[in-house]
Amino acid sequence: MREFLVEITTTVPEGTGQNEVDERRAAEAVRARELAATGHLARLWRPVGELRSIGVWRAADEAELHEKVLGTLPLRPWMTLIVTALESHPNDPGRDGADGRP
């Protein structure tokens, strides 16, 4: 699977009832755990003091990422996304052999 850096900003539409917001957030937590278990959600952070998320997501390609991964999130209709496809860097310390050893 390819990796993608995804920045997510969620904006609740004005006039949305608190009950609906709570239900969607609870469902979002469940879905995030499911996507993590299947390897589609690798990491997720929230910048300090901000109401957005930054995560590393995995999918076969960007179309699958949008349709079958991010598109399944209960909060997706309220989300604005910035998606950046990633590739391994030759100096990534997490790569095999990047520490100079064979």
Image (spheres, rainbow, N blue to C red):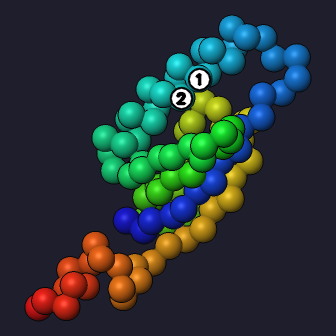
Identify residue for label 1: 25
The extreme top residue here reads 19
Residue 82 horizontal/vertical position (percent): 68, 59
Q: Are marks 1 and 2 in contact (CB under 8 Å)?
A: yes
Residue 97 point in image, percent of width and height: 19, 86
Q: Which residue is located at x 88 percent, y 17 percent?
A: 15
At mark 2, the secondary structure is helix
Q: Residue 7's spot in the image, x, y percent?
A: 63, 54
| Image position of 13 (left or right of 102) | right
Residue at image position (77%, 34%) is: 11
Task: Name above or below for residue 37 compared with residue 5.
Answer: above
Give the residue furthest to the left. 102
Q: Quadrant of residue 33?
A: top left
Q: Which mark is residue 28?
A: 2
User: Would residue 8 appear left or right of 35 to someone viewing this image?
Assistant: right
Q: SS at mark 1?
A: helix
